[in-house]
Image: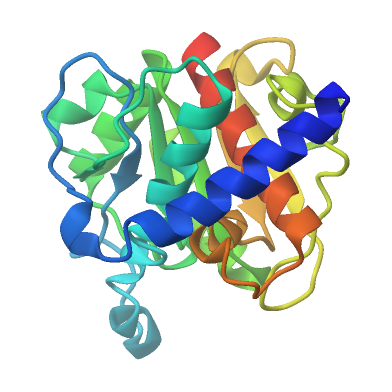
């Protein structure tokens, strides 16, 4: 069995194991205290600045989409295929103004198309990114981009978004992916990836990546359930692993 086939088998088995081993949120904590081990961090937002329309108010809790199974399953994959010392029994959920945020090198945000933020949260997020934090935005489509771009303009006023392709090292930090253009699980559209770099220099550290027209974590959440193609779920897991490895090493 060659190395690539072994990786596919491990990912498939780990996904099925994670999907069945811990079926309920009661077994997955959201308050794992910091102890130096890697812990998946989900950003919680809402209640401040922006998001004034009726529809946006209805989506004020959209930050919790796919919880807890998305991070639960990805944590299991990371444990199985890497040497990262990771908590698999729980994660953290923090707001952008929580001082604990600075203890975690990677922050993942769901549904930034409905993200609302206070000025103080924007200030703290800017400090987090400039001090080495890596932020990932996922699960948003079409003109929801406008809300993300508007908020990030408040966070990093001079930052420029750069369209990324498969040659960037974030897509090859652990797994060599077959493709980064796997379809949105619900809408069937293909994703586009945009990044913000340190000093707006693409040769420098990637501080932010946005998966536009994508819902990578949906594949994590439902892996092992037979809802989505096995090969596509593999690519989604490989992308998640690559993001975590990149964030821990840059």
Above-or-below relation of 143 to 14: below
Quarter of the view holding residue 75? top left
Q: Is residue 149 visible?
A: no
Quarter of the view holding residue 213? bottom right
Above-or-below relation of 58 to 164: below
Picture coordinates of residue 36, whole percent (x, y): 23, 13
Quarter of the view holding residue 41? top left
- In the displayed structure image, the side of residue 193 where residue 131 appears, left or right: left
Picture residue at 69% right of the left edge, 15% below the top: 201
- In the displayed structure image, the side of residue 180 where residue 242 appears, left or right: left
Between 153 and 29, the one nearer to me in the picture: 29
Between 114 and 122, the one nearer to me in the picture: 114
Picture coordinates of residue 34, whole percent (x, y): 15, 23
* Residue furthest to the bottom: 54
Above-or-below relation of 202 to 227: above
Query: If the image is split into quadrants, where does the N terminus sit?
Result: top right
- In the displayed structure image, the side of residue 38 where residue 207 appears, left or right: right
Picture coordinates of residue 28, whole percent (x, y): 23, 51
Picture coordinates of residue 194, whole percent (x, y): 69, 41
Q: Is residue 175 visible?
A: yes
Query: If the image is split into quadrants, where does the C terminus sit?
Result: top right
Picture residue at 32% right of the left edge, 65% below the top: 23
Picture residue at 84% right of the left edge, 52% below the top: 181
- In the displayed structure image, the side of residue 87 where residue 32 appears, left or right: left
């Amino acid at each position: 069995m060659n190395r690539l086939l072994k990786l596919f088998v491990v990912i498939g088995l780990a996904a099925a194991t994670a999907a069945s081993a811990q079926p309920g949120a009661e077994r997955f904590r959201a308050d794992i205290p910091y102890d130096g081990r890697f812990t998946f961090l989900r950003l919680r937002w809402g209640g401040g600045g922006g998001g004034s329309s009726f529809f946006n108010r209805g989506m004020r809790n959209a930050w919790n989409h796919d919880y807890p199974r998305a991070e639960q399953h990805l944590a299991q994959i990371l444990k199985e295929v890497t040497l990262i010392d990771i908590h698999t029994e729980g994660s953290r959920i923090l707001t952008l103004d929580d001082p604990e945020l600075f203890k975690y090198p990677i922050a993942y945000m769901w549904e930034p198309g409905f993200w609302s933020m206070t000025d103080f949260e924007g200030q703290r997020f800017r400090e987090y990114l400039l001090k080495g934090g890596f932020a990932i935005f996922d699960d948003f489509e079409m003109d929801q981009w406008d809300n993300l771009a508007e908020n990030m303009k408040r966070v990093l006023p001079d930052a420029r978004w750069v369209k990324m392709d498969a040659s960037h090292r974030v897509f090859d930090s652990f797994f060599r992916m077959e493709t980064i253009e796997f379809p949105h699980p619900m809408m069937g559209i293909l994703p586009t990836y945009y990044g913000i770099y340190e000093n707006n220099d693409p040769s420098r550290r990637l501080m932010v990546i946005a998966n536009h027209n994508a819902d990578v974590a949906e594949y994590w959440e439902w892996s092992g359930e037979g809802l989505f193609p096995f090969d596509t779920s593999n690519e989604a897991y490989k992308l998640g692993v690559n993001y975590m490895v990149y964030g821990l090493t840059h």
